[in-house]
C-alpha cells in the first residue's frame, strides 16, 4: 500500500505501477534522459560532473543512471494513466528528448485518438532561462526546456500573467547536492500554476527532492521515487532540513 508524502527508493516503474488510475493532480518530473550520455561519448565528462574543476568536490565521473529513450513512450503512458482528467504534467528535457516525447504523444499508436480536447496534448514547451550560463562547448547553455502536457480538456492555470520563459538562476555545481539540481523557485511556479492546495504532485525522478520541497512549501501533497540510494538519502535529509517534514521514507 503506497502512502503519499513519502519518497520511495526504487525505479520509476516500481512506484508508478502501484499508483491507481486517475489519482494524481500534477506530474512534475526531471527524467535522467539518455541524451545526457552524449557528453560521455564526446569525452566531455566534466560537463556531467559534480563540483567545480580545481576544487576538492570535483568528481567528473560522478553521475546518476539514465533511462533509455525506449522507456519514454511507457513513461508517458503511465503519466497519462495516473493523472486525473484535466490535469497537467511538466517534463524537463533537452531538445533531443523533446522531439522523442512529442513524437510519442502525437503517435496514434500510443494515444489514439490524439488531438485538441483528446487524450494527451503536448501543450507547449516552456523555457527555463538559467540566467547564469553553463559550460561553453558550443554556445553556452543558458536554457532548458520544460514540456507542458495536459490530459483531456484544458485545466485553467492559476495565473495567466506568467510568461512561458521562466527566469531563475541555476544552482552552481558547488552548491548542488546532485548534478542538474533544479531551483526550488522554478518548481514552485509550476506547482502553483497547475494545482490547488492539498492536491497531489508526483515526481518519478526525485533527485535531491526539489519537487517535494516546492510542494510542501505550497501546501501540496507529493509522492516520488528515486533509484539511487545515495541521492535518495540526500533528498530525505534535504526535505527534512528545508521543510521540517519527517517520516518521509516510503517502504
Ligand atoms: C535529473 S535528476 C533529477 C534532479 C531533480 N529534479 C533535482 O532538482 O534534484 C534525475 C534523477 O533520476 C534518478 N534516476 C535514474 N534512473 C532512475 C530510475 N530508473 N528510476 C528512478 N529514478 C532514477 C537519478 O538517480 C537522478 O537522481
Image (cartoon, rainbow, N blue to C red):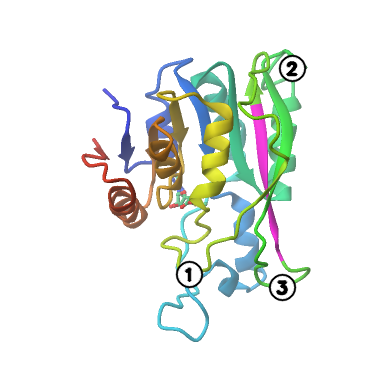
- Residues 47 and 185: in front is 185
Alpha carbon separation for disc pair 2 and 3: 39 Å
Q: Is residue 230 left or right of residue 173?
A: left
Alpha carbon separation for disc pair 1 and 3: 16 Å
For the record, the magenta segment spans 141-149
Compared with 224, 17 (above or below) is above
- Find disc 3 in the rendering and name its residue: 136
Q: Is residue 164 magenta?
A: no
Q: Residues within 10 Å of mark 1 (few under 14, many from 20)?
A: many
- Find disc 1 in the rendering and name its residue: 50
Q: Is residue 77 left or right of residue 184?
A: right
Q: Residue 14 lies in what quarter of the image? A: top left
Q: Position of residue 15 (x, y in %)?
A: 38, 32
Q: Residues within 10 Å of mark 2 (few under 14, many from 20)?
A: some
Q: Residue at x 78, y 68 (%)?
A: 139
Q: Residues within 10 Å of mark 3 (few under 14, many from 20)?
A: few
- Find disc 2 in the rendering and name its residue: 114
Q: Mark 2, mark 1: which one is toward the viewer? A: 1
| Residue 78 in view | yes
Q: Residue furthest bottom?
A: 54
Q: Secondary structure at mark 1?
A: loop
Amino acid at each position: 500500500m503506497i502512502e503519499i508524502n513519502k519518497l520511495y527508493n526504487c525505479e520509476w516503474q516500481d512506484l508508478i505501477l502501484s499508483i491507481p488510475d486517475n489519482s494524481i493532480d500534477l506530474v512534475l518530473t526531471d527524467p535522467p534522459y539518455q541524451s545526457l550520455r552524449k557528453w560521455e561519448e564526446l569525452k566531455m565528462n566534466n560537463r556531467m560532473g559534480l563540483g567545480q574543476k580545481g576544487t576538492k568536490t570535483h568528481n567528473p565521473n560522478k553521475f546518476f543512471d539514465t533511462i533509455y529513450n525506449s522507456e519514454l513512450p511507457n513513461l508517458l503512458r503511465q503519466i497519462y494513466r495516473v493523472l486525473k482528467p484535466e490535469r497537467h504534467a511538466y517534463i524537463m528535457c533537452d531538445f533531443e528528448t523533446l522531439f522523442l516525447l512529442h513524437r510519442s504523444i502525437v503517435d496514434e499508436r500510443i494515444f489514439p485518438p490524439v488531438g485538441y480536447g483528446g487524450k494527451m496534448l503536448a501543450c507547449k514547451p516552456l523555457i527555463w532561462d538559467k540566467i547564469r550560463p553553463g559550460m561553453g562547448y558550443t554556445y553556452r547553455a543558458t536554457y532548458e526546456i520544460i514540456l507542458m502536457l495536459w490530459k483531456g480538456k484544458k485545466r485553467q492555470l492559476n495565473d495567466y500573467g506568467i510568461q512561458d520563459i521562466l527566469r531563475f538562476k541555476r544552482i552552481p555545481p558547488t552548491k548542488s547536492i546532485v548534478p542538474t539540481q533544479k531551483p526550488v523557485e522554478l518548481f514552485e511556479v509550476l506547482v502553483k500554476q497547475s494545482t490547488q492546495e492539498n492536491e497531489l504532485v508526483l515526481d518519478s525522478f526525485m533527485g535531491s527532492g526539489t519537487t517535494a520541497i516546492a510542494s510542501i512549501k505550497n501546501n501540496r501533497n507529493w509522492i516520488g521515487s528515486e533509484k539511487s540510494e545515495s541521492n535518495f538519502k540526500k533528498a530525505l535529509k534535504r526535505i527534512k532540513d528545508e521543510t521540517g517534514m519527517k517520516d518521509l521514507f516510503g517502504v
